[in-house]
């Protein structure tokens, strides 16, 4: 996947955060307060880690690829390249076996700490993001909203990465490993 595609992924990610932040918990039927999640460890963004992310992302341009990103690389890339264009600060991304967590602070139109957990699956050679839980300021978003956001993000990725065929995505402790091929490369 080219750097342009990773920039588009960043934009998709940004739109997701903005969508989640704009759903005011006050207007959600059946809203429920969730227990305060254990915050992720604070990782200050690193220019070096963001640069490693971008260098590794170039692997998607090859005919076959196996790319591994760490929590630090993804967090740094998001913090230094995406978060400034959103009402979102102090983003943190963490990978655990079979799941990921994204958290940070929404600064507008509502203020509060955002926590999203989910997984990434492979469906017909494309990544499919499935959000399992999300809360803003301790108020859980309904599953219907999460399903809609998951579908939107997955559709945007499908449109942008049409030539990339993902064979496997592994969410492991502290890292994500993506294996596949690029149909546009001989």
Image (spheres, rainbow, N blue to C red):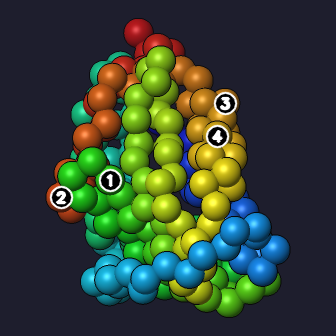
How far apart in space, not on screen, are marks 3 and 2 (Cα)? 29 Å
Q: Circle 4 sits in a helix, a strand or a loop, which is it?
A: helix
How far apart in space, not on screen, are marks 4 and 3 (Cα)? 12 Å
Which of the two residues, 25 or 48, is positioned nearer the viewer here?
A: 25
How far apart in space, not on screen, are marks 1 and 3 (Cα)? 24 Å
Q: Which residue is mark 2?
A: 173
The x and y percentages for residue 142 are 64, 61
Earlier residue among tags 1 and 3: 1
Which of the two residues, 35 or 185, is positioned nearer the viewer here?
A: 35
- Residue 22 horizontal side relative to residue 122, left or right: right
Q: Quadrant of the C terminus?
A: top left
How far apart in space, not on screen, are marks 1 and 4 (Cα)? 17 Å
Name the residue: 74% across, 86% down.
110
Crowd class of label 2 (few under 14; some 14 to 19; many from 20; radius 10 Å) = some
Name the residue: 63% across, 83% down.
106
**Residue 140 lies in quadrant:** bottom right
Name the residue: 32% across, 66% down.
94
- Residue 33 horizontal side relative to residue 119, left or right: right
Crowd class of label 1 (few under 14; some 14 to 19; many from 20; radius 10 Å) = many
Q: Residue furthest left?
A: 173
Q: Circle 3 sits in a helix, a strand or a loop, which is it?
A: helix
Q: Which residue is mark 1?
A: 99
How far apart in space, not on screen, are marks 1 and 2 (Cα)? 9 Å
In the displayed structure, would residue 30 be above or below residue 145? Answer: below
Q: Is residue 18 visible?
A: no
Earlier residue among tags 1 and 4: 1
The mark closer to the camera, 4 or 2, is 4
How far apart in space, not on screen, are marks 4 and 2 (Cα)? 26 Å
Crowd class of label 3 (few under 14; some 14 to 19; many from 20; radius 10 Å) = few
Q: Which residue is mark 4?
A: 151
């Amino acid at each position: 996947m080219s750097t342009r595609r990773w920039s588009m992924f960043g934009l998709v990610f940004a739109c997701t955060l903005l969508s989640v932040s704009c759903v005011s918990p006050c207007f959600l039927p059946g809203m429920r307060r969730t227990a305060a999640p254990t915050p992720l460890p604070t990782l200050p963004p690193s220019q070096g880690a963001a640069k490693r992310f971008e260098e590794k992302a170039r692997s998607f341009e090859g005919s076959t690829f196996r790319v591994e990103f760490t929590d630090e690389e993804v967090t740094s890339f998001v913090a230094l390249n995406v978060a400034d264009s959103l009402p979102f600060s102090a983003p943190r991304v963490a990978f655990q076996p079979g799941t990921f967590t994204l958290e940070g602070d929404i600064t507008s139109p509502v203020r509060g700490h955002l926590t999203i957990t989910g997984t990434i699956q492979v469906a017909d050679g494309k990544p499919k993001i499935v959000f399992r839980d999300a809360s803003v300021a301790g108020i859980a978003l309904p599953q219907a909203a999460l399903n809609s956001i998951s579908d939107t993000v997955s559709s945007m990725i499908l449109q942008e990465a049409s030539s990339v065929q993902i064979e496997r995505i592994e969410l492991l402790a502290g890292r994500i490993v993506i294996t596949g091929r690029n149909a546009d490369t001989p």
